[in-house]
Amino acid sequence: MDLPENELRGYIEDNGRPMWTAHNNHNRRYFKEEEIRIITNNYDTLLGKGGFGEVYKGILDDNSSVAVKRYIHNVKENFAKEVIVHSEINHRNVVRLIGCCIGEDALMIVTEYVSRGNLSDILHCSEISISLETRLDIAIGCAEALSYMHSQMYGQVIHGDIKPANILLDDNLNAKISDFGISKLLSTDNTLYASHVIGSIGYMDPLFARNGRLTSKSDVYSFGVVLLELITRRKAVDDGKINLIENFTQALAKRKKIREFYDVQVADENNLRILDGIGKLAAKCLAMDLEKRPEMKDVAESLRMFRKAQYQSQEKILLFGWVRRSKRPPQNMVPTDKHLHGMREGSPRLYSFGSSQGIELEKLLVASSEVLGKGKYASTYKAVLDDGFTLTVKRLKNTIDVPEAVFKERIAAIGTIEHELVVPLRQYYYSKDEKILVYDYFPNISLASILHGKHHPLVPVRWETRSAIALSVARAVTFIHSTNAAAASHGDLNSSNILLTGRSYEARVSEHGLKTLVSDPTLVIDNNITQKDDVYSFGVILLEMLTGKSPELKPDLLEWVLALIREEWVSEAFDEKLLTENTAVEELVQFLKLAIHCCDKNPTLRPTMSEVAQQIEPHIGACSFGGILEEFE
């Protein structure tokens, strides 16, 4: 079929009507080539490439983000069929089709933009921790979408290319199936014989590859491979070899050590039986007898049962050690500060700052929690209350026995700090054995993780974004210093304590003052924890953003930079992701000078944080705190 452009739109509109078009829930929009150029800023942000062509990010006139799939080879028949198939699918776990462009030399499909990239990159190209619960949710979302496509639509859709690279994840790691380039829409028979077998090695059903017979069970096989990757975090195809499927199914058949395959992040004692069940379900999907493979609706139901069992078996992490020992807290929490809400003497509770009443201690004791991280001064938990409300809880490490009066004086100083760029302390608990701090919950994404790999975005973080983050941090620390309270310093400023919040990833400084809560009182009095230490730490953060290097670089990040300057190789210091044709290198050099000034060995020669903020401000455009951070969406 070689349709001219003026007939291609008609073909898309009419093909298959009235068989299934009446059931289409999409209002498909047709874009002109010039509109696409405006939407994508002349194809400025490339999201990915494939055999079909390229995908770009775009912004519609209502400020919503979209992905634009641009066909390179302009195979009009394939393009038309993809639009037709995708138009028929309306499911929360399928990427939403918005419209298409039919130009003389440009065929493009416009879909919703899914922010976190694809499952393959998350599993194999990042260090992000993914709980078994989240992995089950991803699997269930995909299984329900495929079940819908196979058995709940007027015309059955077979995807034909299910693999982690075609499963996209949003901000909350909800799964959305994408790429319907080789999908088939069937109206009568549930089987299709293909003259040209196409698909992805390692995920393609071997029976389809052998005889060209495409059925819904072909998708079941591919989904079985995805299940294996989810529980093992290993690639199905590694260095061109398809080892995972064969090795796992052989080990399962011989009842050998299949548990050695599981990802160690989720393979704890509470999860092993559930992982075994998922592994056996994957093996059924991979069966070489077509009749023995389950239907996708049955796969989805099995996965929902595994998730329910996982909920029931998951032990709650109790934040307070004394709950295990005595079932009741010690009776020594007495409020001593006018800023705090108190109860009658001897009544244990969490104490709140300001006018907020906060939550009750009893609710926190029974919260379901997961470990977010273990730092130098505290272990951090995500606590979900019975009503679904989520908090961040820090359990201080009692390295030093800080007297109660000193602790409460310092905690009062920390609690009075309220600024839009500082994560506020909401409540606290104090006893001799336990010291607990309660904060608002923010997703556990830090500046360190996007710079150094744990949550590394697919699109490079541009200098405009990094400098805007730097100004936010400088302003936040300036405010902390301006309070003039006892020990009014952050004390442990680093890129891991700079959280990037919401869809725009704006910066928030966290963990201010924690060091003072676990330090010997004489150290604070002797000014060993000072505001100039914060300035030095900020200088290191600037170096991280300029170089892309971790501060753990050996022998030392600052010395590495200074050595390059001495050798007159300054340009080698900058992160290559920053050095585009639009980069103002002179501005990078100015920031590098500022970072080195902040890190001066003589603390008295370092600038104040207020002076640092003033030096950064002229370099930040008026839009920096709004649209410039949207590149992370």
Image: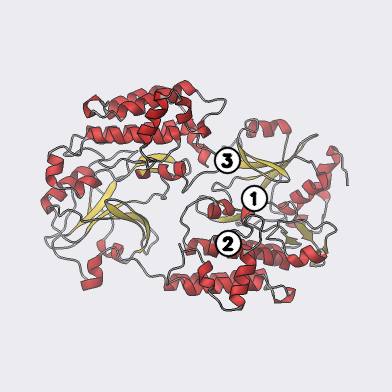
Question: Secondary structure beneath disc 1?
Answer: loop
For label 2, the residue is 229
Q: Amino acid at mark 1?
A: Arg
Does 170 sit left or right of 396 as displayed? right
Mark positioned earlier in the residue sequence (1 or 3) = 3
Question: What is the crowding at mark 3: few (fewer than 14 residues within 10 Å), some, or many (at least 20)?
Answer: few
Question: What is the crowding at mark 1: few (fewer than 14 residues within 10 Å), some, or many (at least 20)?
Answer: many
Q: Amino acid at mark 2?
A: Glu
Which one is in front in this view, the residue at disc 2 or the one at disc 3? 2
For label 1, the residue is 96
Question: Secondary structure beneath disc 2?
Answer: helix
Q: Which mark is residue 64?
A: 3
**Who is closer to the viewer here, 412 or 433?**
433
Question: Secondary structure beneath disc 3?
Answer: loop
Q: Amino acid at mark 3?
A: Ser
Q: CA distance from mark 2 to mark 3?
A: 32 Å
Residue beneath the point at 34% across and 38% down: 421
**Who is closer to the viewer here, 256 or 54?**
256
Q: CA distance from mark 1 to mark 2?
A: 25 Å
- The quadrant where residue 614 appears: top left
Place of residue 23 in the rendered image (x, y in percent of width and height, measured from the top left): 73, 57
Question: What is the crowding at mark 2: few (fewer than 14 residues within 10 Å), some, or many (at least 20)?
Answer: many
Place of residue 296 in the rendered image (x, y in percent of width and height, measured from the top left): 66, 68
Residue beneath the point at 35% across and 35% down: 540
Residue beneath the point at 78% across and 41% down: 73
